[in-house]
């Protein structure tokens, strides 16, 4: 794992922007994208950039079950506002939160992933170690699945809804194995609230109780942190930028 620590999230996100640029040099690049506040600065930089995504595909990690693409809290809506309205991609894929036929949704998403192998996967991390919506305890061999969100995730995400009772209780998410199939993974985390879980994920045991810890096994993972998120790491192979 390559761990890079930057002064702030703007410098950190500028570094990730360069990885997008490199990946685009390939003819038909496939980007695995994430939601949450962590990649917002990156998406702002991408919007302002002159990068052309018209031949690239975007495949998102997850979507709330029961929210339609035009619901302001859906991840489909978030992605349009953050990136796709300004930077058109050839294809954009996000699980369909309105598909109640879970088998059908899972199969079609796995087919999309099979047809569009991800070159660069962006990940944030939940304070409980989740990646995508793979909550603690998720099987490391999981593929796309319907997840029951934990109380801690519902609590973290309620800030975007009127109250906790409005936060969906389930979501579709790419599984851990689907994520690990990406050629390159970039895990981003900013702020002190992520410091403890980052230390556990990067330096603790590889365990299903901390889903992000599996990234220690990926041959090509880059971790991009700000100073605050890196403060409890002991690893001597950290690159301070
Ligand atoms: C959500 C998303 C994750 C994201 C996490 C952290 O639960 N499903 O993909 O990484 O939140 O969000 P934030 O970046 O806002 O801390």
Image (cartoon, rainbow, N blue to C red):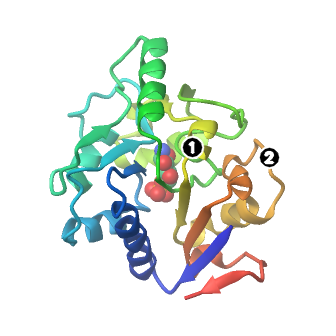
Task: From the top left corner, tell me how far across and down residue 6 is, in percent.
Answer: 52, 83
The image shows residue 71, relative to residue 194, as above or below, that is: above
Residue 71 versus residue 88 in the image, above or below: above
Residue extending farthest to the front is 27
Query: Which residue sits at x=33%, y=50%?
Result: 28
Q: Residue 196 at x, y = what percent?
A: 70, 65
Distance from disc 2 to disc 1, alpha carbons, whole Å, reads 16 Å
Disc 1, SS: helix
Q: Is residue 220 left or right of residue 42?
A: right
Residue sitting at x 67%, y 64%:
198
* Residue contact between numbered discs 2 and 1, judged by CB atoms under 8 Å: no
Please identify the quarter of the rendering in which residue 209 is found: top right
Q: Residues within 10 Å of mark 1 (few under 14, many from 20)?
A: many
Outermost residue to the right: 205
Identify the residue shown where x is 77% and y is 78%: 235
Give the image location of residue 118, x and y in percent.
47, 46
* Label number found at residue 179: 1
Question: Assess mark 2: CB under 8 A from ligand 1?
Answer: no
**Where residue 176 sits: x, y (%)?**
62, 39
**Label 2 belongs to which residue?**
207
Secondary structure at badge 2 equals loop
- Examine the rendered structure and indicate whether residue 241 appears above or below residue 151: below
Residue appearing at x 47%, y 52% in the figure = 119
Left or right? Give the position of 160 relative to 231.
left
Name of the residue lying farthest toward the left: 86
Q: Quadrant of the N terminus?
A: bottom right
Q: Is residue 15 above or below residue 43?
A: below
């Amino acid at each position: 794992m390559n761990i890079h620590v930057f002064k702030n999230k703007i410098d950190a996100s500028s570094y990730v922007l360069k990885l997008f640029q490199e990946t685009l040099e390939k003819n038909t690049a496939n980007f695995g994208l994430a939601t949450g506040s962590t990649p917002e600065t990156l998406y702002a930089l991408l919007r302002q950039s002159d990068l052309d995504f018209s031949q690239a595909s975007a495949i998102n990690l997850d979507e709330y079950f029961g929210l339609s693409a035009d619901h302001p809290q859906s991840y489909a809506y978030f992605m349009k506002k953050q990136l796709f309205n300004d930077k058109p991609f050839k294809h954009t894929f996000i699980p369909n939160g309105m598909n109640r036929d879970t088998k059908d949704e899972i199969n079609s998403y796995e087919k999309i992933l099979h047809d569009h192998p991800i070159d660069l996967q962006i990940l944030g991390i939940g304070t409980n170690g989740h990646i995508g919506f793979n909550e603690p305890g998720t099987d490391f061999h999981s593929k796309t699945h319907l997840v029951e969100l934990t109380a801690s995730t519902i609590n973290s995400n309620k800030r975007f809804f009127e109250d906790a009772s409005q936060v969906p209780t389930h979501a579709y998410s790419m599984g851990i194995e689907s994520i690990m199939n990406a050629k390159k993974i970039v895990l981003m985390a900013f702020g002190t609230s992520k410091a403890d879980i980052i230390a556990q994920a990067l330096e603790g045991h590889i365990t299903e109780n901390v889903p992000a810890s599996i990234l220690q096994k990926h041959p090509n993972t880059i971790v991009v942190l700000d100073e605050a998120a890196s403060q409890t790491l002991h690893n001597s192979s950290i690159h301070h930028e």
